Image (cartoon, grey):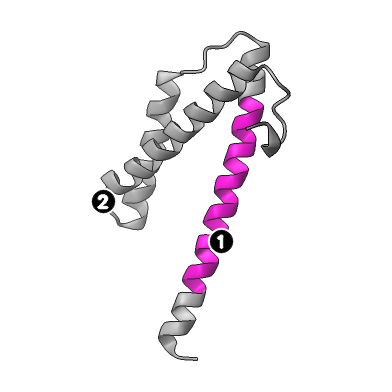
Amino acid sequence: MSDLDALRDRLDDADRRILEAIADRFEIIRAIAAYKGANDVPMMQPARVSVVQEHYAQAADRIGIPSEHLRSVATSLIAAACDLETRLMADGEPLNTPEHG
């Protein structure tokens, strides 16, 4: 195995961990949607959006990449989360499992 192949294997493993983290994030979003639906909390929370985007921007600074790149990741994740929450809250179904999305 070449050095490049070994580095690509490490990159593939990092991507696998990222995807697992995203799956975990969306399981939590399902629980948040259930909570919001049960407690009449509005889906959109603009202050929370800003907090998440700022966390990503600060992480970018720590790891040495332009913050706009991770802000873009945060914005994409937030958009997908809002879409999922909107659909789940509109359905009024139990929201614990991926089958309900």
Secondary structure under the numbered disc 2 in the rendered image: loop
| Vertical position of residue 95 compared to residue 72: above or below | above
- Residue 13 on image: x %, y %: 55, 68
Main secondary structure type of the part rendered in magenta: helix
Which residue is pictured at 57% across the width and 58% down the height?
A: 17
* Magenta-colored stretch includes residue 42: no
* Structural crowding at the residue carrying mark 2, measured as other residues with C-alpha within 10 Å and reported as few (<14), some (14–19) or many (≥20): few
| Vertical position of residue 32 compared to residue 1: above or below | above
Nearest to viewer (mark 1 / mark 2): 1
The three-letter amino acid code for the residue at tag 2 is Pro
- Residue 49 on image: x %, y %: 41, 27
C-alpha span from label 1 to label 2:
23 Å
Between 91 and 73, the one nearer to me in the picture: 91
- Residue 75 on image: x %, y %: 37, 36
Q: Which residue is mark 2?
A: 66
What segment carries the magenta color?
Answer: 10-32
Q: Which residue is mark 1?
A: 16
